[in-house]
Image (cartoon, grey):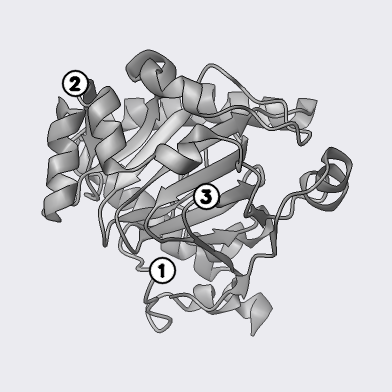
């Protein structure tokens, strides 16, 4: 895995301490007991989810890259949740559940958690579930809405690599997207091919059952499921005017331009942006050597 500094771990924090030490300065932290009173902490596993919400139809995503006019984040499959969980149990799929809205998709699970009072104004219309099997990876990206995220993990181990927004210049960001180059393996980076990565400063969290990771707004993250697991994402939308404008620009301008150009140019658009990702990132190399 990319060389990284461990993210600090705490049992829990008061609202005042969290805001002063983590939210305001945008510093990640892992809470080990923040959700100790949730029934999800005691109950959420594959069998429980299958029994309670297994009949729900869920969209699933693979790790494929964007090609031609195919949108990278389009679902690769849809199936009943129980069927997907059986695939995970058999260890035979790279399909992932991605940002599945529990209010619309599996309201049976809403009673199992609550929103902690730690100084984040949570957007309560989209509590989202993420799930994958052992070995699954999530491409390096940051979230389009620039939300503060509380990622609460259940099941087997999950490793999350984080980079602060000021490291963007080293991460081969693809223009008109919110991702790094698809071919970069942050679990085993090729510094010869992607030399700018050597200058990036990373932080890492190893999440175990019950851990909650605070990911500040705009942070890049890369995820490796070391074992089958699921995570609940609770989000707090931007709280400043500047960040709100950036979010609207991402949603209304960047995403719209990308969608139109992909339809018009197909693979030529993808190839252009990947070349630019390398060229623009390598401009910074003379400044750091």
Of residue 47 and residue 89, the one placed in the foreground of this image is: 47
Query: Does residue 205 appear in the picture of this structure?
Result: yes
Please determine whether, in this image, residue 41 is positioned above or below residue 165: above
Q: Position of residue 165 (x, y in %)?
A: 65, 53
Pick whichever, 201 or 107, lies toward us: 107
Is 213 situated above or below 278? above
Mark-to-mark CA distance, 3 and 1: 25 Å
The disc at residue 186 is 1
Question: How crowded is the residue under tag 1: few (<14 C-alpha within 10 Å), some, or many (20+)?
Answer: some
**Res 72 seen here:** no
With respect to residue 34, does 220 lie above or below?
A: below
Instruction: Specify which label sits upstream in the sequence, 1 or 2.
Output: 2
In the image, taking residue 187 as reference, residue 87 lies left or right, namely left
Q: Is residue 33 left or right of residue 104?
A: right
Q: Position of residue 39 (x, y in %)?
A: 50, 33
**Spatial CA span between label 2 and label 3:** 25 Å
Which residue is nearer to you in this view: 125 or 175?
125
On the image, which quarter does residue 14 sit in? Answer: top right
The residue carrying mark 2 is 55
């Amino acid at each position: 895995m990319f060389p990284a500094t461990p993210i600090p771990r705490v049992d829990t924090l008061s609202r005042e301490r969290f805001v002063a030490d983590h939210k305001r300065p945008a510093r990640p932290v892992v809470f080990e007991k923040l959700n100790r009173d949730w029934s999800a902490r005691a109950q959420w596993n594959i069998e429980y989810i299958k029994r309670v919400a297994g009949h729900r139809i869920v969209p699933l995503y693979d790790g494929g890259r964007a090609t031609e006019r195919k949108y990278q984040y389009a679902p690769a499959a849809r199936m009943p949740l129980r069927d997907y969980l059986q695939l995970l149990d058999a260890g035979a799929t790279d399909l992932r559940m991605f940002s599945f809205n529990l209010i619309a998709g599996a309201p049976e699970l809403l009673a199992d958690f609550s929103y902690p009072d730690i100084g984040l104004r949570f957007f309560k219309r989209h509590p989202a579930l993420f799930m994958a099997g052992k070995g699954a990876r999530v491409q390096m990206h940051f979230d389009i809405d620039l939300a503060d995220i509380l990622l609460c993990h259940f099941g087997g181990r999950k490793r999350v690599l984080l980079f602060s927004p000021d490291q963007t210049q080293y991460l081969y960001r693809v223009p008109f997207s919110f991702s790094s180059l698809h071919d970069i393996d942050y679990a085993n980076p090729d510094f010869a091919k992607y030399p700018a990565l050597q200058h990036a400063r990373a932080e890492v969290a190893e999440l175990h059952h019950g851990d909650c990771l605070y990911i500040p707004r705009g942070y890049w993250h890369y995820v490796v499921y070391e074992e089958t697991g699921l995570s609940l994402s609770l989000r707090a939308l931007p709280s400043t005017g500047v960040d709100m404008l950036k979010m609207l620009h991402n949603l209304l301008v960047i995403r719209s331009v990308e969608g139109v150009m992909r339809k018009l140019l197909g693979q030529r658009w993808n190839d252009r942006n990947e070349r630019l990702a390398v060229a623009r990132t390598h401009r910074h190399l003379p400044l750091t050597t």
